[in-house]
Image (tube, grey):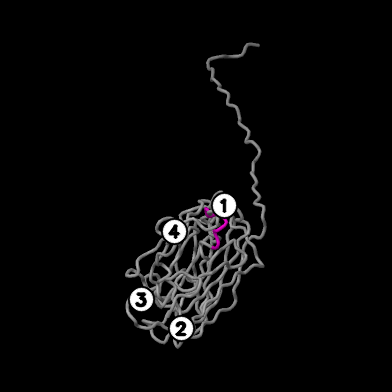
Amino acid sequence: MAALAGYPSDISLPDSARYYNFIETTKKLNSNYDITWSFQYKLPSTSITNNLSSQVGFTTFLTNLSSPLSSLPGQYLGDQDPEAVLSAHALLTEVPEVLKTEDGSSILLEDAMLSGMLVKIAFDSSGLYALSGRDDRPGIHRNRVKRESLIIRDFAHNLVVNTPLSTISTSFSTLSTDTFRTLRFRYVNLGRTLHIDFRDTGTTTYAVLTSINLGYRLTNVSNLNNIMCGFSFSTPISTHQATAAPQFSAGNFFLKNFHVEGFVGGEVLTETVTSTEIPVLSTTTYTTVTGISAIK
């Protein structure tokens, strides 16, 4: 197993690896309003040949890139390569080459930290999406990964959530499902909150998987009225490990009914609602006088 040509050395996948990435470009949404999207997936238990070695991960995300640029497979689960996406904002030498620090990290301008992505939600059987990576990508050490996990990264690739599904829900504790499961995502409250819901086949109501306070409100970032929903998939996640034990790709994975809802438009309209002034009644003080009689 060798590293893929042109990719970081920590991505080591077999020739049979499967990975893809798509973006729904027909709806360009305004992130100042709520964005809701959903899809159905099925990962049969027969697709997982060995619970300890089979690896599969899929993600969904909001982005302002109309097409994936240099999408990284493996444990990056379709993330854009920082050097490729941000090269226009990197500090270049006269050659030109991207200027790097002593430890090999690219020196990037601060206004480029959006990296084309607002939020990315991963369902990862290996937990490797939470790993730290190239160009100072924040994350955890390999000995702290959590299998069958929900992992969320924000617009700066910070690790916001890294939690085993079993600690979130007893009815959604593993990725495998022999019937189609619907996942719904609600990006609300001006991007401050993310709700994740799910329902299994045969049910008509959603159950809340989790609600996440993203802890930020993007300001001074352009193109936030041009947000699209996307999806990425990879199996296996990475063959690199301390032992020589092999890693296996998962079997069949099914995806259908990718659905997006939100406000399409570039102008955010605001209106101040005023009411007529409430009249104020003046008060007059009266004194009662007694002991006075009228004379004809």
Residue at image location 41% in from the left, 82% down from the top = 54
Q: Is residue 202 above or below residue 167?
A: below
Q: Residues within 10 Å of mark 4 (few under 14, many from 20)?
A: some
Q: Residue at label 1?
A: 221
- Residue 202 visible? The answer is no
| Dot 2 or dot 1, earlier in sequence | 1
The residue lying furthest to the front in this view is 95
| Dot 2 or dot 4, earlier in sequence | 4
| Dot 1 or dot 4, earlier in sequence | 4
- Looking at the picture, how far across and down is residue 46, in whole percent? 45, 88
Q: Residues within 10 Å of mark 1 (few under 14, many from 20)?
A: few
Query: Which is more foreground, mark 1 or mark 4?
Result: 4
Find the distance from the CA under tag 3 to the CA under tag 1: 39 Å
In the rendered structure, find residue 241 and report the number of the disc placed on it. 3
| Dot 3 or dot 2, earlier in sequence | 3
Callout 4 secondary element: loop
* 1 and 4 marks in contact (CB < 8 Å): no
Q: Amino acid at mark 3?
A: Gln
Q: Residue at label 4?
A: 105
